[in-house]
């Protein structure tokens, strides 16, 4: 009973330990080819558990499940059940559904896929509280009233640091009526408590939705203490090896899309070595240098989209704009040598406007971009525009931001670009730069 409780919300309502074990499911083994959905993808989920899932499909697990269904080319349905004691028994075991979207690696009620993200517990506090802590050992936490969900790893670690002024919240609860970890965040925002330590996805999501500025500090594991960090996988029945292999391949191919969705929900992510993955903040202006480096998860005034959304938008008539710069001539090439750049491969139907994504484009480049968009949209500022280049490419971010500034009302930013497109199983085609009716050489700059 205790073991099942600790994993009923897979670390989420905040599993006590990863060493849990459970009785075998006790069903005759199925054939090796069983499991991969061919008619409909049925997902076991909680109808009221944001940021993970709800019956309006607003959670990040809802969105990742939709990616899987789209990849399988089947409809998506959900079997709703509160994620508390009996969740797996009443859903996956009874074959009411075929996939649980989030479970801690090592949980044995289900067969685990490879992990698709790793997160950690997080400390949260109001930025105006006077607390400045980056670890639980920080003196500014001494005496603070700190909320914590009962029987979760932080409660034991807090005692090691003399943090005894705890505000407890219930672990096992009916999510149709109570959301204790969410309440812990809201109590900090309302100054009913000074701080709280909750599972990172919950901390990041609800802290971003409070009316007061909140600090979210992802926590590192401490030697000799209960771990804060857990790898999260998907869960399936143990007699479906082909389904597991398919899902592992999906995770490998679509990790960029998954990470993008997690970033939108402010999920703290942990690297394989246990370090916290830094989230890139959105700047107020344009990126002016180091254009090939990690980008923010979003862009104010534009919608961030993945390969599935781009495919749908393209079929609906959106304009696809590739802004990857032209490649520079090889270093050491003689001045009188003729150099032919390699063919540029892009999305089918895309229009290539190279060298328009600089933070401070030349007048020539700015005019090329402005007139190019006007021509491609026939002057319709409401027509959807999808701007992209490659992953970790600020050129596309700058270009999308500039399109918003030019008054385009349906700007979509595709940060995964051509690599994300091919990872989703799509082909690229060779494209040529769009002609420039104003200037003759829009490629007067090359990317650094």
Image: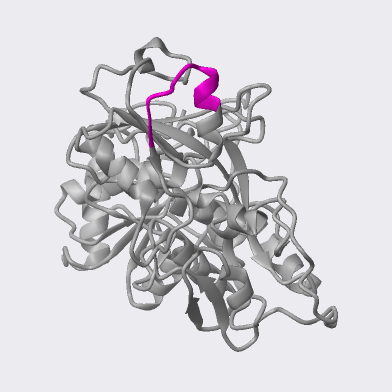
The type of colouring in the image is one colour
Is residue 319 or residue 287 the one in the foreground?
287
Is residue 361 or residue 223 the one in the foreground?
223
Give the vertical position of 129 relative to 190 (above or below). Answer: above
The quarter in which the N terminus is drawn is bottom right
Is residue 121 or residue 70 the one in the foreground?
121
Q: Quadrant of residue 363?
A: top left
Give the vertical position of 130 relative to 189 (above or below). Answer: above
In the image, residue 159 lies in the stretch drawn in magenta: yes
In the image, residue 268 lies in the stretch drawn in magenta: no
Kindly give the residue lying farthest to the bottom in the view shown: 39
Can residue 407 be seen here? The reply is yes
Name the residue located 61 percent from the left edge and 32 percent from the top edge. 337
Q: Quadrant of residue 153?
A: top right
Q: Please count the marks in the image.
A: 0
Q: Position of residue 412 (x, y in %)?
A: 32, 58
Name the residue located 68 percent from the left edge and 23 percent from the top edge. 224
Q: Position of residue 83 (x, y in %)?
A: 50, 64
Is residue 412 or residue 325 the one in the foreground?
412
Specify whether 424 is left or right of 140.
right
Q: Quadrant of residue 267?
A: top left
Q: Position of residue 82 (x, y in %)?
A: 46, 68
- In the rendered structure, which segment of residues is drawn in magenta? 157-167
Specify whether 332 is left or right of 180.
right
Can residue 445 be seen here? The reply is no
Name the residue located 52 percent from the left edge and 68 percent from the top edge. 65
Kindly give the residue lying farthest to the top in the view shown: 139
Name the residue located 65 percent from the left edge and 64 percent from the top edge. 235
Specify whether 386 is left or right of 334.
left
């Amino acid at each position: 009973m205790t073991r099942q409780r600790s994993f009923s919300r897979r670390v989420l309502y905040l599993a006590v330990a990863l060493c849990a074990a459970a009785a075998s499911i006790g069903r005759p083994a199925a054939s090796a080819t069983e499991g991969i959905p061919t008619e409909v993808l049925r997902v076991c989920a909680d109808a009221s558990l944001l940021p993970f899932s709800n019956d309006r499909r607003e959670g990040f697990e809802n969105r990742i499940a939709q990616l899987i269904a789209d990849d399988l080319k089947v409809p998506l349905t959900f079997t709703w059940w509160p994620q508390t004691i009996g969740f797996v028994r009443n859903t996956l075991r009874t074959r009411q559904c075929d996939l649980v979207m989030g479970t801690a690696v090592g949980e044995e009620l289900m067969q685990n896929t490879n992990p698709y993200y790793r997160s950690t517990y997080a400390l949260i506090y109001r930025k105006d509280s006077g607390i400045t802590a980056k670890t639980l050992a920080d003196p500014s936490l001494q005496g603070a009233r700190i909320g914590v969900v009962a029987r979760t790893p932080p409660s034991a670690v807090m005692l090691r640091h003399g943090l005894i002024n705890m505000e407890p919240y219930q672990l096992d609860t009916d999510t149709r009526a109570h959301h204790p970890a969410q309440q812990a965040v809201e109590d900090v925002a309302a100054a009913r408590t000074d701080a709280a330590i909750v599972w990172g996805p919950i901390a990041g999501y609800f802290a971003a939705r409070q009316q007061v500025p909140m600090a979210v500090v992802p926590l590192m594991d401490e030697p000799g203490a209960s771990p804060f960090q857990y790898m999260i996988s998907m869960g399936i029945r143990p007699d479906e090896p082909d389904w597991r292999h398919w899902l592992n391949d999906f995770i490998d191919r679509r990790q960029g899309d998954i990470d993008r969705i997690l970033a939108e929900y402010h999920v703290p992510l942990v690297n394989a070595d246990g370090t916290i993955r830094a989230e890139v903040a959105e700047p107020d202006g344009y990126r002016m240098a180091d254009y090939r480096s990690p980008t923010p998860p979003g862009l104010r005034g534009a919608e961030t989209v993945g390969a599935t959304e781009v495919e749908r938008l393209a079929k609906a008539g959106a304009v696809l704009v590739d802004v990857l710069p032209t490649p520079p001539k090889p270093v050491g090439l003689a001045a009188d040598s003729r150099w032919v750049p390699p063919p540029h491969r892009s999305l089918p139907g895309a229009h290539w406007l190279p060298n328009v994504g600089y933070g401070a484009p030349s007048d020539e480049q700015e005019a090329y971009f402005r007139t190019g968009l006007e021509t491609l949209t026939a002057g319709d500022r409401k027509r959807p525009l999808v701007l992209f280049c490659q992953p970790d490419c600020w050129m596309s971010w700058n270009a999308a931001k500039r399109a918003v500034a030019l008054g385009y009302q349906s700007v979509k930013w595709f940060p995964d670009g051509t690599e994300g497109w091919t990872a989703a199983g799509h082909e690229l085609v060779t494209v040529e730069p769009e002609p420039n009716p104003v200037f003759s050489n829009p490629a007067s700059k090359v990317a650094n």
